[in-house]
Amino acid sequence: MRKISKEEKTMKLNLFKSKVLTGALALAMTVAMVPSMAMAEDAVKGTSPELQSELSLQLTALGEPVINNGWSTFQYGGVSVSISTDVEKIQFVQYPAVEGENEYHIVDNTNFTYFPKHFSMKISPQSEVTATNGASFQYYNAPYGVVTMGTEPADFTITNGNTTIVVHCPAPYGEATVGTGPVAYLPGYGQFANEGVNQGGWGDAYTNDTAGRKAMMNAISPTGISLGSFGGYAIFDFGENGVANDPKNKYGVDFIVYGNAFVGNAEPGGIQVSQDGTTWYNIAGSRHYANSTVWDYTVTHTNKVPTDDDIEGTREGKPFTGEYKAATKSKARPNSAVIPGEYQIKYNTWHEHNWFPLYGNYFKIRKAGELPLANLSLAEQFATYTPKTGDAASKLELKGTKIDFTSMSGNDYTFGYCDVHPNGNTPGVASNPYTAVAGTAGGDGIDISWAVNADGEPVNLDNIRYVRIYTGVMKDNPPFGETSTEVCGVYNVNPQATAVGVAYQSSLSDGENTYEPVSVDGSNTQGMTLIQQEPGTMVYNIAAEDVADLYLNGIKVEENEVRIGNMIARFDGKNLTVEVSLGENDTQYLQIITQPNGDEEAYINLVKFTIN
């Protein structure tokens, strides 16, 4: 085969693309629509003979990669390589008239409007992969791996024995929804704080002392970040266009958080979202309205080895082996009294270093042109650091919503939290968060419609830019250390072609009056119902049509009687009632979520009961 120049190759490929996008051929010839030769030929039946002739000429340029079950795959020399057509909207094509039979191109299937900076690629059997122009490939769960592009086109060379394959990728374009996160990271007091710093360990957001931050935006880092005990956090920036609360997203899931959970090892993390990095909203998960959940919880840590903060550079510090107790403050609801307390955390022998996050690791600049990892300017509402002064030790105050840690089973934290469900092997693909059980893979999908203000009331957000993830429990498990949320990546979900629909809203009645939810700022997925009653007990009927699953304050309604805080729900298989008891000045919240049997979004109705 004649060897052609780079310039001639580029000319041929550009000519191919220009013809693909010409007139009626734009839809027929877009690579997205060519999962097979037969389908491509069928796509233009009925066009003029001239167009059919032109199409036939162009089709001869395409090889035979196969699309099956959402993956574009080719096999060469015993090596199979696949990329996702569903998640990242890309696929393989081959130009045998231009290059050798072992060369393939990755193109987008969105009319050449988008090519991702990060995407998954399966290579089996496990092979050696090298890349040009700053790009990289890293296995995270073979055969699955993550491609990270630089700013230029890149070639990936896959080598396995005598087999060599070259995959060509264009420079990323059109990906305005992905920022550069994590833009802030600060672990709470715990065994991974200060550990593996400058070595890509769980206690650092940098990969090493010279490279940048771990690739965790629309990517999964094999070694993520550990958030330590309650309040340790990471903040991710999805860029100016952010994450849309898109009606085309299956189940209403707008983004997905991936941790390192497995069956029997849920370490739930709380989540907040913001449009501007200043005003933050809580994601009201399945435990948010439980009586045991504290909406405003504060823990204050003190460095028991103050001299560790005097050390220049990064280090682990000396272990403190005595009894360590952190001061706490609990304010269950906005009008509740503040209750002081303390919490004990015990050291273990596997992580013999200082567990307090040290100044040199998180509070000083480590990379030129960047802020300290803690980025307190972005997290000032939730983190206050007091540096060491003289003999006075440094202190760290962390805040958030604390849920009661009842067990390590994912069944106890159904939706709205992260590091609860295993990741699985299809990053970016949403699972139904309402039907997930402890072993359901797919990470933890988050619906922006779960967002609420400090009073627990829903807010309608069209999109968000920032996501803050923090350890949402305060639990020590000696000798294994604190319960700590881990984060390995966050994904912006790709929407479906059309809106998925919304469940019917619920309503309540007391025999005389019917109470319908009022839309929250025009939202078609969120409503709020205000009911005033006299002190005492009232029974309300709950009506909800055509739903497969119905949740009351995160508890799935089944054929039984269940206590929901100070309320009692009864369901006989046909009729659903809730018994509400209020004393003087009492307020009760009842979050009713209806979710149909399908891809539709849930409808969220927050009922607020107050005294008349």
Image: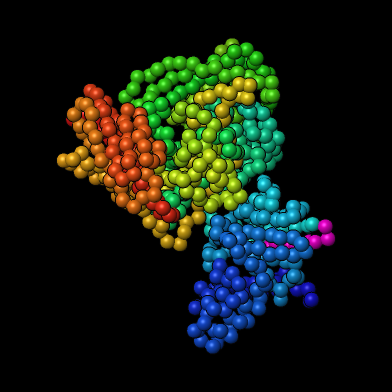
Q: Position of residue 332 (x, y in %)?
A: 38, 25
Q: Which image quarter is the N terminus in? A: bottom right
Residue 238 visible here: no
Q: At x 57% / y 79%, what residue is drawn?
A: 41
Q: Residue at x 70, y 35 (%)?
A: 199
Rendering coords of residue 521 (x, y %): 30, 46
Q: Is residue 559 magenta?
A: no
Magenta-colored segment: predominant secondary structure? strand
Q: How many marks?
A: 0
User: In the image, is residue 417 above or below residue 326?
Assistant: below
Residue 475 vs residue 205, the one in the foreground: 475
Instruction: Say which residue appears at 65% left-offset and 63% top-offset.
Output: 73
Rendering coords of residue 104 (x, y %)? 69, 66
| Above or below 423: residue 333 | above
Does 117 sit left or right of 196 as displayed?
A: left
| Residue range highlighted in magenta | 161-168
